[in-house]
Image (cartoon, rainbow, N blue to C red):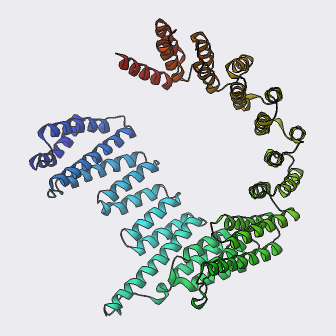
Amino acid sequence: MAEIIQERIEDRLPELEQLERIGLFSHAEIKAVIKKASDLEYRIQRRTLFKEDFINYVQYEINLLELIQRRRARIGYSFKKDEIENSIVHRVQGVFRRASAKWKDDVQLWLSYVVFCKKWAAKAQLSKVFSAMLAIHSNKPALWIMAAKWEMEDRLSSESARQLFLRALRFHPECPKLYQEYFRMELMNAEKLRKEKQEFEKAKIDVGNLDYSEEILKGELARIIYKNSVSIIKGAEFHVSLLSIAQLFDFAKDLQREIYDDLQALHTDDPLTWDYVARRELEIESQPEEQPATKQARAVEVGRKEDRCCAVYEEAVKTLPTEAMWKCYINFCLERFTKKTNSQFLREKRLERTMVAFRKAHELRLLPEFQYKQWIELLLRHDFIKDALEVAVAGTELFRGSVTMWQMKLQVLIDSKSPDIDVLFGEAFVHLKPQVCLPLWISWAEWSESGKSQEDTEAIFKKALSAVTGADSVSLKDKYLDWAYRSGGYKKARVVFKSLQESRPFSVDFFRKMMQFEKEQESCKMANLREYYERALREFGSVDSDLWMDYIKEELNHPLGRPENCGQIYWRAMKMLQGESAEVFVAKHAMHQAGHV
């Protein structure tokens, strides 16, 4: 093995001598490179091989290449690249070949190889790299697409890209993404050829000998891909995706029209078709002579376009009266309503249109839960409290087990200052499962704090803690403690803390809040701080290195602290902390000590 390493180091000597001779590296730096290279070579030549060693080797060589580039730029020297950079690039390729042969299944390794070849002008090798990678990873469509795009965009070889797509489709005959990208590639190729032909004609160069087939120029190959793909992959979503790609190419108007007509003919029972057809009305431009001149006229024109969209949606919900179709219609109305405009006319028209759509879907019982929430929020934003309450009542009737609907109903009652809020909270808990009620308990406590007595609010917190158990109770305890401090100061907070200190589980913030409350007092008692730290460490001492560090700092900095306890706390921490937490603690402790030297 030593002979192999020595031979490989000797192979480097010509490039290293050139680096020193032209002044890019000093003699000391060359010696450092040789030493590092020897170590890296040893690691990739030994009997037991590790992928990390190959990655480190490659990364070192790349760093070296980048350093050479920067130094060349600094001194303005651009010669001897064949003897220096090309030699390094060739060596890295050899390492990549060995690594990818040993760890064939590592896609990330192959992709790193591809990126290296692209960046360091080794493009002649890239086709071979892609071929080797695809021979092993033929089951990954994204890699086929990447290879085809490179052939098309970098090597400018539409034929190679086409062959790759055709091979990929033999492996993945039902992959939508492959068809989409193949379709896009053929349209891009047709557009490129059309531009080439126009440039030749402009320069009055005879193109008779060149292969500019009219069918290809019109996008006939893309049309064949479209026809084949929609016969295999059914559904409006895929159909619309191809139409969206075709619309990026102005020359493909006939193809766009054909795809659009097929979409309407083949997928009338799909809400996505109607949604696409309706939204298309927004894109239809007015005739030049009809272009609106004033802001008001432009607003009226936008209103007309939106009316045409809604006319399509109205036809859609009659033809296809489903929840999914109404969802598309209402989403459109909401999108247009949230679109900014200075026109009062448009704002009012959009609001009315949205409200009508919500109301119709509700009457047909085709409104999903999340859209009831959207409707109520819209009504509340515009102070339609009475209507919001009516909708919220209907929503809770339809979705009795939904905590979101009960929250919305309660929000409406709170906004309307209803006297029945306590009763409704009680009614909600009857219908809801205990494990989903936490948001309601928190809402009830927050509402009570703003308008009820301390006794009433505390009674709600206590009821909540008896009903909510396990991990859900953690945030409730934190909120109870915060409320106690806000409403009754430190004394009340300490009483609540004492009542909960054995009621696991906790968050670390539960204890840290008490530490902070203690520090805010005029006479901050170290004995109380120790109690809070000890209780916190009992729960989190095996994972939270910051707690141990803060405890040590407290003993050092507090006027009544005992610095002599710090050593004992340190050793307790070392016993309790596990794995990485212990390492972090040791590092932080060392830094803290260094800062106090």
Q: Is residue 389 visible?
A: yes
Closest to the observer, 220 or 408: 408
Q: Residue furthest front?
A: 522
Question: Which residue is rendered at x = 80% and y = 56% of the image?
Answer: 372
Tell me if residue 266 comes above or below residue 82 in the rendering: below
Instruction: Count all numbered tags in the image, as a single digit.
Output: 0
From the viewer's perspective, tell me whether residue 411 is left or right of residue 103: right
Q: Which of the 4 quarters of the picture holds residue 5?
A: top left
The percent coordinates of residue 557 (x first, y second) are 47, 14
Q: Which of the 4 quarters of the picture holds residue 504?
A: top right
**Dividing the image into 4 quarters, which one contains the N terminus?**
top left
Closest to the observer, 470 or 519: 519
Closest to the observer, 330 or 248: 330
Tell me if residue 163 comes above or below residue 484 in the rendering: below
Closest to the observer, 370 or 550: 550
Q: Which of the 4 quarters of the picture holds residue 515?
A: top right
Question: Which residue is rendered at x = 47% and y = 84% of the image?
Answer: 216
The percent coordinates of residue 233 (x first, y second) are 65, 69
Tell me if residue 81 comes above or below residue 282 in the rendering: above
Tell me if residue 63 comes above or below residue 170 in the rendering: above
The percent coordinates of residue 476 (x first, y second) are 73, 30
**Dividing the image into 4 quarters, which one contains the C terminus?**
top left
Question: Which residue is rendered at x = 79% and y = 77% of the image?
Answer: 315
From the viewer's perspective, tell me whether residue 140 is left or right of residue 51: right
Q: Is residue 104 visible?
A: no
Q: Residue furthest top?
A: 564
The percent coordinates of residue 248 (x first, y second) are 52, 76
